[in-house]
Image (cartoon, rainbow, N blue to C red):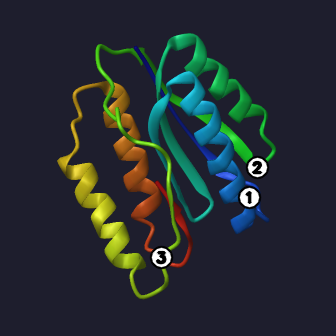
Amino acid sequence: MYQLNYRSKSKNDLKLEDLEDILVTANRINLSKRITGCLIYHNGSFVQILEGGKKDVKAVYEKIKLDDRHSMVTLLWESKVTNRCFPDWNMAYHKPNNNDLEIYINNLMLLSAMSEKSTASLLSFWESVHKILDNNHLSTEITI
């Protein structure tokens, strides 16, 4: 089993349809390759952790680096692991309205606090999630 996480910036004119397309494509590809993980998008930043077979995870990452909806793609960590940390997670989308965005961000922060951090990859992932959520701009969509 292999884990990889990265961060990136979205292109400036990323639209809701672009995010939905990313999720549809990711769900299809990841399901077929038995890749699990978690993707967070907030205020123009992506943070994602992928887990699965090394060859498949690296292939997905290479496609992400070539995707013009991403810029400044930065590898944060990659390593061999013994178990999946997101075994049943499939990517879903939540577009909170202004009334519940702060609650949703607080729930993500709570999830990160309660989540296992047994690997450097997980520590790096959750620290990066905190960085994009902590900026107090509570006006955009989040993907998880």
- Residue type, mark 1 in image: Asp
Residue 96's label in the rendered image is 3
How far is mark 1 from mark 3, CA to CA? 17 Å
Q: Which is more N-terminal, label 3 or label 1?
A: 1
Q: SS for tag 1?
A: helix
Q: Position of residue 139 (x, y in %)?
A: 53, 78
Q: Are marks 2 and 1 in contact (CB under 8 Å)?
A: yes
Left or right of residue 99: residue 139: right
How far is mark 2 from mark 1, CA to CA? 8 Å
Residue 69's label in the rendered image is 2
Q: Which is more N-terminal, label 1 or label 2?
A: 1
Q: SS for tag 3?
A: loop
Left or right of residue 24: residue 134: left
Give the vertical position of 97 relative to 41 (above or below): below
At a point 50% along the width and 54% down the height, the residue shown is 92
Q: Position of residue 2 (x, y in %)?
A: 44, 16
Within 10 Å of disc 1 (Cα), the crowding (few <14, some 14-19, many 20+) is: few
Residue at image mark 1: 18
Q: Which is more N-terminal, label 3 or label 2?
A: 2
- Residue type, mark 2 in image: Arg
Q: Nearer the viewer, residue 59 or 43?
A: 59
At a point 39% along the width and 81% down the height, the residue shown is 100
Question: Could you say which quadrant of the image residue 51 lies in?
Answer: top left
Q: Are marks 2 and 3 in contact (CB under 8 Å)?
A: no
- Residue type, mark 3 in image: Pro
The number of numbered badges drawn on the structure is 3
Q: Nearer the viewer, mark 2 or mark 3?
A: 3
How far is mark 2 from mark 3, CA to CA? 22 Å
Question: Could you say which quadrant of the image residue 60 lies in?
Answer: top right
Q: Position of residue 47 (x, y in %)?
A: 51, 45
Q: Position of residue 126 (x, y in %)?
A: 35, 44
Left or right of residue 84: residue 40: right
